[in-house]
């Protein structure tokens, strides 16, 4: 067996050597970008700078047809490259010439250009396609949500496959023009700014532009009949919100929450620095899902988020992501704490502002609420694994980790880090290790121990997120009792903060797709 393997390897090698050097310089790009959680997501060999997505949608039948033009640059000599996509493709062109294409795996579109692409070469890739996205399942689900009057694309980490071909990984961000033709009376909503509408022969075209880098999962499309509100914030930022006309008894609570977007984005700017984008807002379509998603500049909210009344906490969460997640995006999906830990912590800050419990009280409460044998503590927010990427622990323990960081560096340095990081890394990508290096630089403190304890240890930390100088901190550091529920008032569980229930109601924020 071993001998045969050696022989075939040797013959493969001689075959390889027989290929002319010029041709062997050009290789297929990888089918995945190399994310440990999602090996097939994204692709290798090129980077995208812009998506031009031009669609026609028929709400009555859910038929979507489109042409997407991708501006890309090869990062290696490419004989072939992949896009991620799930609808039926009828034609592909690369730099004007017809290209061969084939599908493989769940969402791979393999494109072989007529002429190979040299490293550094610019490529204009045109893909023509159509489909009924609500009927197209990948890994057993569709991220296209059918509504009574249209359809919605919003999910994490996968949403793009059902409406445009892409390099589907947050490490490759690009600008977007999205233009959608819909029957008169129906609207199409996407990210950024509505640059124009034109009507002809019973159809209206809506054209949207997101002029700042955007991850593929943060691109969203909503088609349906909406009541739209437009305004500007006190600081002059355009606000565009939309509500399905058929939200029923959730309609008022949705408005009482989402209409506060302008106020809340200005409030968050005080903590995170200048808002990074040129538009803000949210939309509430009539979908049966329960989650909300921080789709860039135009947040997706399920009506169920407002089933128990207004919830400004969820609006704060999704707006916080505009800095932590959208402007500064994760480099790999394992870095999810950089998104969810901070978005949840923003809810803690909002609770504090509303006198419904301080961030410290909320952190103490989370710590005390989960006994040491609770599986909650098995999940490492700093590397939860793909199955637990959006589990409650990533949010709750993740936010406690932020409070522990605050206690370690002190308020002055903490708020400097909170504002400085999204400014320093604006429109880019980052890892937890890079965040740690930044926080250490600003604070002058080594933070490996505190971050390891709260992010990377699969057990309940022996000591709660105690502020420095408290009696509990002193006694805890003098004689830590492994596994004990040491807290500020050891022995007496803290009272439930007033904001707790509203924060819990946002826990289906990223419920699993299925
Ligand atoms: Zn979130």
Image (tube, rainbow, N blue to C red):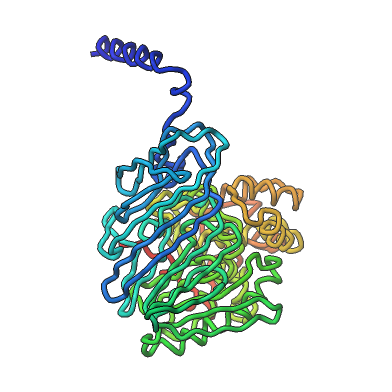
Q: Is residue 361 visible?
A: yes
* Vertical order, 9 against 138 (above or below): above
- Residue located at (49% from left, 78% from top): 502
Q: Is residue 283 above or below residue 68?
A: below
Residue drawn at the location 39% of the way across and 77% of the way down: 203
Residue drawn at (57%, 73%), measured in percent from left and top? 316
Q: Quadrant of residue 240?
A: bottom right
Quadrant assignment, res 308: bottom left
Q: In the figure, is residue 417 to the left or right of 286?
A: right
Instruction: Give x and y (percent) for residue 14.
Output: 36, 12
Residue most extreme to the left? 1
Relative depth, front residue between 274 and 188: 188
Q: With respect to residue 171, does 281 lie above or below? A: below
Q: Quadrant of residue 211?
A: bottom right
**Residue 321 rendering spot, x and y as whole percentages:** 56, 64
Return the x and y of residue 35 as percentages of the image width and height. 45, 43
Identify which residue is drawn at 69% across, 82% down.
234
Pick the front one: 108 or 126: 126
Can you give x and y, in whole percent of width and height, for residue 165 in the image?
A: 41, 53
Q: Which quadrant: the N terminus?
A: top left
Residue 486 seen in the figure: no
- Which quadrant does the C terminus fall into? bottom left
Query: Which is nearer the eye, 503 or 50?
Result: 50
Numbered-mark total: 0
């Amino acid at each position: 067996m071993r001998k045969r393997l050696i022989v075939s390897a040797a013959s493969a090698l001689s075959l390889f050597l027989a290929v002319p050097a010029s041709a062997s310089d050009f290789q297929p790009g990888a089918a995945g970008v190399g994310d440990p959680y999602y090996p097939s997501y994204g692709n290798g060999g090129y980077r995208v700078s812009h998506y031009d997505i031009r669609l026609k949608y028929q709400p009555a039948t859910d038929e979507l047809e489109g042409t997407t033009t991708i501006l890309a640059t090869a990062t290696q000599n490419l004989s072939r490259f992949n896009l991620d996509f799930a609808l039926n493709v009828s034609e592909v062109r690369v730099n004007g010439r017809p290209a061969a294409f084939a599908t493989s795996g769940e969402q791979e579109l393999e494109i072989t250009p007529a002429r190979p692409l040299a490293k550094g070469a610019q490529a204009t890739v045109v893909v023509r396609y159509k489909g009924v996205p609500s009927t197209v399942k990948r890994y057993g689900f569709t991220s296209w949500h059918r509504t009574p009057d249209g359809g919605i694309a919003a999910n994490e980490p996968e949403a793009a496959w059902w409406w445009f071909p892409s390099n589907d990984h947050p490490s490759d961000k690009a600008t977007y023009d999205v233009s959608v033709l819909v029957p008169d009376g129906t609207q199409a909503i996407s990210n950024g700014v509505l640059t124009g509408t034109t009507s002809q022969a019973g159809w209206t075209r809506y054209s949207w532009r997101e002029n700042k880098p955007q991850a593929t999962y943060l691109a969203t499309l909503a088609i349906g009949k909406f009541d739209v509100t437009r305004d500007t914030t006190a600081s002059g930022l355009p606000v565009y919100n939309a509500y399905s006309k058929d939200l029923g008894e959730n309609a008022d609570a949705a408005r009482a929450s989402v209409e506060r977007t302008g106020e809340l984005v200005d409030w968050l700017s005080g903590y995170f620095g200048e808002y990074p984008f040129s538009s803000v807002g949210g939309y509430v379509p009539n979908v049966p899902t329960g989650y909300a998603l921080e789709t860039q500049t135009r947040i997706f909210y399920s009506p169920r988020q407002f089933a128990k009344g207004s919830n400004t906490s969820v609006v704060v969460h999704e707006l916080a992501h505009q800095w932590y997640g959208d402007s500064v995006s994760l480099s790999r999906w394992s870095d999810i704490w950089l998104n969810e830990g901070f978005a949840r912590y923003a809810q803690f800050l909002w609770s504090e502002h509303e006198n419904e419990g301080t961030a410290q009280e909320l952190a103490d409460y989370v710590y005390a609420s989960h006994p040491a044998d609770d599986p909650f503590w098995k999940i490492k927010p700093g590397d939860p694994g793909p199955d637990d990427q959006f589990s409650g622990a990533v949010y709750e323990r993740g936010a406690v980790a932020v409070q522990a960081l605050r206690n370690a560096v002190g308020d002055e340095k903490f708020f400097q880090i909170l504002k400085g990081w999204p400014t320093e890394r604006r429109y880019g990508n980052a890892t937890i290790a890079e965040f740690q290096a930044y926080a250490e630089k600003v604070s002058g403190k080594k933070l490996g121990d505190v971050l390891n304890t709260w992010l990377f240890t699969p057990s309940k930390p022996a000591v709660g997120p105690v502020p420095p100088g408290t009696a509990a901190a002193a006694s805890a550091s003098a004689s830590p009792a492994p596994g004990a529920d040491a807290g500020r008032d050891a022995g007496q569980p803290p009272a439930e903060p007033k904001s707790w229930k509203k924060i819990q109601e946002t826990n289906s924020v990223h419920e699993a797709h299925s």
